[in-house]
Image (cartoon, grey):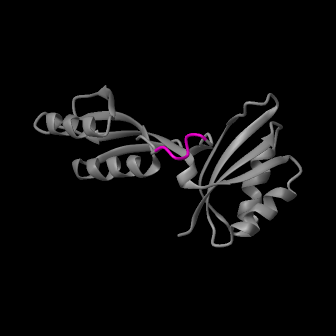
Amino acid sequence: MTVHVLSVLVEDKPGVLARVASMFARRGFNIHSLAVGPAAEPGNSLMTVVVDAAEIEQVVKQLRKLINTIKITELNPDESVERELMLVRVSADASKRGELLDSAAVFKAKAVDVGTTSITFEMSGSPAKVNDFLELVRPYGLIDVVKSGWIALSRDSKSRNLRAIG
């Protein structure tokens, strides 16, 4: 899988998200993750699109053809900050709770709901870290998992030489 992270600045108008998703579907590109929110500039939205495509140039060409697209940037993982949010509910009987909470602490996952038979954790971090935590708790028994999808921004040019934390 060749994964690319695209930051796409678009006009904040009805139907833009549908047109972008339709373009990917028509062209046979697989969207791995899609997150959209308001951009710094009023009237615009910023999409973070994680796409599985060998030919990223073709994806970019097709996105540029869409009328509401303003700017497209492929984000280099070494020069950007990527994060994902996850809520995961895990089976947790009394004998496993301490062990599970200790494991979560290593990943800085926060217990946000504790029930009689389960614990729900909130966890954010790099997509790899989120997936590592998910794999760590999987043996306990996953009940529910929901992820936000990747969000990403390019690093400040002065901070590119610094190591990412988290």
Of the 4 image quadrants, the one containing the C terminus is top left
Residue for point 72% across, 61% down: 24
Furthest toward the bottom, the residue is 54
Q: Does residue 75 belong to the magenta stretch?
A: no
Say which of 3 and 29 sits in front.
3
**How many labels were placed on the picture?**
0
Is there any visible trace of residue 149 in the rendered image? no
Say which of 11 and 159 sits in front.
159
Say which of 71 and 87 sits in front.
71
Q: Position of residue 128 (x, y in %)?
A: 42, 52
Is there any visible trace of residue 159 in the rendered image? yes
Residues in magenta, as a range: 158-162
- Height in image: 87 above or below 126? above
Furthest toward the left, the residue is 95
Q: Position of residue 135 (x, y in %)?
A: 31, 53
Q: Position of residue 117 (x, y in %)?
A: 22, 34
Residue for point 57% across, 50% down: 79
Q: Is residue 42 left or right of residue 102?
A: right
Residue for point 57% across, 47% down: 80
Q: Position of residue 47 (x, y in %)?
A: 69, 44
- Height in image: 53 above or below 38? below
- Height in image: 128 above or below 90? below
Q: Is residue 102 left or right of residue 19?
A: left
Residue for point 87% across, 58% down: 65
Q: Which secondary structure type mostly characterizes the magenta part of the structure?
A: loop
Furthest toward the right, the residue is 67
Quarter of the image for residue 108 reads top left
